Image (spheres, coloured by chain):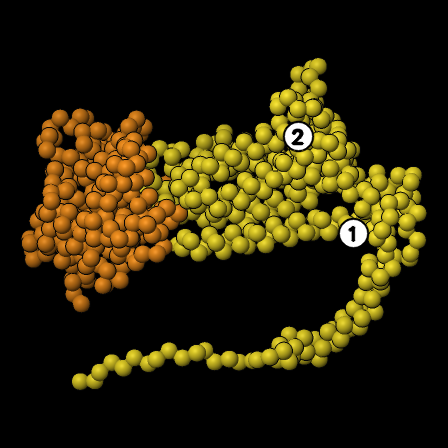
Chain colours: A orange, B yellow
Amino acid sequence: MTATNSAADSQDVIVIENLNKWYGNFHVLRDINLKVKKGERIVICGPSGSGKSTTIRCINRLEEFQEGSLVVDGVEMIEDVKNIEKIRRDVGMVFQHFNLFPHLTILENLTLGPIWVQKKPKAEAEEIAMKYLERVKIPDQADKYPGQLSGGQQQRVAIARSLCMNPNIMLFDEPTSALDPEMIKEVLDVMVELAEEGMTMLCVTHEMGFAKKVADRVIFMDAGQIVEENEPNEFFNNPQNERTKLFLSQILGH
Amino acid sequence: MKEFQPIAARQAPIKTVGFTAWLRDNLFSSIPNSVVTLSVIALLAYYLPLVFDWVFWSANFTGTTEDACVKEGACWVFINAWSYQFFYGTYPVEEVWRINLTLVLLVMVIAASFTLPKSIRLKASITSWLLLPIVGIAILDGRWLGLEVVSTDLWGGFTLNVFMAAASIIVAFPFSFLWALGRRSEMPFIRSVSVIFIEFFRGVPVLSLFFMGSVMLPLFFAEGTNVDKLIRVWLVLIFFMSGYMAEVFRGGFQAVPSGQYEAADSIGLSYWQKILLIILPQVIKVSMPNILATFVMLFKNTTFLLIIGIPEVVQTLQTALSNSYWLGGHALEGYLFVFLVFWGSCFSMSVLARRIERQMNTDKRD
Ligand SMILES: Nc1ncnc2c1ncn2[C@@H]1O[C@H](COP(=O)(O)OP(=O)(O)OP(=O)(O)O)[C@@H](O)[C@H]1O
Ligand SMILES: [Mg+2]
């Protein structure tokens, strides 16, 4: 266990130190160390089962961990964080399978958080929702149900739903890997725009074009560990580790 | 370079047409099949005329007493003469509007739950469903409204079956949801209590529960309090029903993907907000057909109340059959009547259920 994180720069919005996690006896995350500054854009890649999802899910506490420390926005995430809901409000998350609420309209999906969590009046919440729907370029779908939208549209709604909570940090877990090629671009465009506005982003993705374009740092994970961590140019052109080289040749090789 | 040429859509080919094709495919597709079809036709040809004759041609429709039944066939006069009791028990005639009013309210609440505008539907229908049992009791009993008090031993007939079933399922609904939640809980104590409760009420015959309700439950109430018999069986029905529905809901919970919980968590909803706003509506939607099936089962089980002497419709029928003015042996007519009334209501419920399902599927695809 580490002591306090007084040494951490106040600019760091996420500080992960020696994080270890087990599923039963299976050691999923091993000594993860990671600091994320405000406004930084980080892409995490790695083979299936390497622990990418688990890592970012620890950040908004969708997963618990057994050892190490994790500080988000200055709040230490321990066994029973009193204000876990507050952290979750500040950390938006976008999932591979969108996870929109199928029984609510698009507009209701977006206003749910502002109304019930932030206690905003309905009219104000709807105004915010429409603003973000315009930003993801589908204001005309507000009254439809998720099932009536294409995958790309659903994922953009999911991004807008997170943005409505006005988060400081956005987590993306393979946001485009359930999408057809034509739809990937429309989602990536929204994410690039978001990056350009200075949002702190952690993004698990294998879209290397996106990584090259927006990432400040690329992190490569394997077998529950961070194998390599570098700025994109170096990472792609001059990987330091054999394992990284192999992985890159596999995903870029064809 | 070639140009892409779209092919115009054509009608699907029609394989078999007409009545004879249908007959051949369904009734005479093989020799054994044809033999069965022919024997069934022969049986029907023999028995149907007899049944029709008894029910219609030589049946007695007019009159008011046993003496009016002179013809061979059914004595529908008997049903007619007792119809009030069959429906309303011994509820005073001049107060019977109260039963009818309660029935109308029940129908209105059902209709409202499906037709109100979306924006207020959920809140309005939940409120009215929860108020309905209280309002119903107030109207039927009368004491809280300053009406003439009609004590519960006068309530009876088919409407009592309806009210007992409806009042039980309404109250059981929230409880069964809680039991189902408890069964999924990570806290061992809550989980085991829920499992024991659910399995007890599912594993014990409803008849023995009714006996327990009338004999054992009074032991739990403070001495000197005399809790109404109907309230006691109401409690039994609520427990019984919530055990069954908890399992129905459990199935519904399993149908909601874990991503829904995670998405709700990730926007910072609290546990109860997540359960009530996100999970419950989806659970109810997938459980709807099974909820209705469970309700139909409960509704039919209310006839078992006759065992402990509650004058529901079958009990009323037996009273009528043993009445000294009607000793002509009308059991067949009587049971056929009860059969038709139950079958009619259960069948319309399943028709309604199918419509609801279809409506749900069309207005929210997922
Ligand atoms: N709930 C769980 N119980 C047990 N093991 C789990 C659970 N969730 C994940 N794992 C295991 O933990 C490991 C890491 O999973 P994780 O989902 O983080 O991988 P990932 O890097 O995101 O992979 P992918 O690219 O396939 O999404 C995998 O081996 C997985 O099988
Ligand atoms: Mg993953």
Which residue is located at x 15 percent, y 47 percent?
A194
Disc 1: host chain: B
**Residue B306 coordinates in the image, percent (x, y):** 77, 37
Please identify the quadrant where the C terminus of chain B is shown.
bottom left
- The disc, 2 or 1, on the residue closer to the chain's N-terminal end is 2
Res A249 → quadrant: bottom left
Which residue is located at x 14 percent, y 39 percent?
A36
- Kind of residue indicated by mark 2: Leu
Q: Going by the image, does B193 lie left or right of A18?
A: right
- The answer to whether residue A170 is visible is yes
Residue indicated by mark 2: B140
- Which of B201 and B25 lies nearest the eye of the viewer? B25
Using the numbered discs, state the Cα–Cα distance from disc 2 to disc 1 in whole angstroms: 29 Å
| Element type at mark 1 | helix
Which residue is located at x 20 percent, y 53 percent?
A137
Question: Compared with residue B49, is residue A67 higher up or lower down, i.e. above or below?
Answer: above
In this rendering, the label closer to the viewer, 2 or 1: 2
Residue indicated by mark 1: B336
Q: Which mark is residue A234?
A: none
Q: Going by the image, does B333 lie left or right of B24?
A: right
Q: Callout 1: few (<14), some (14-19), or many (20+) C-alpha neighbours within 10 Å?
A: few
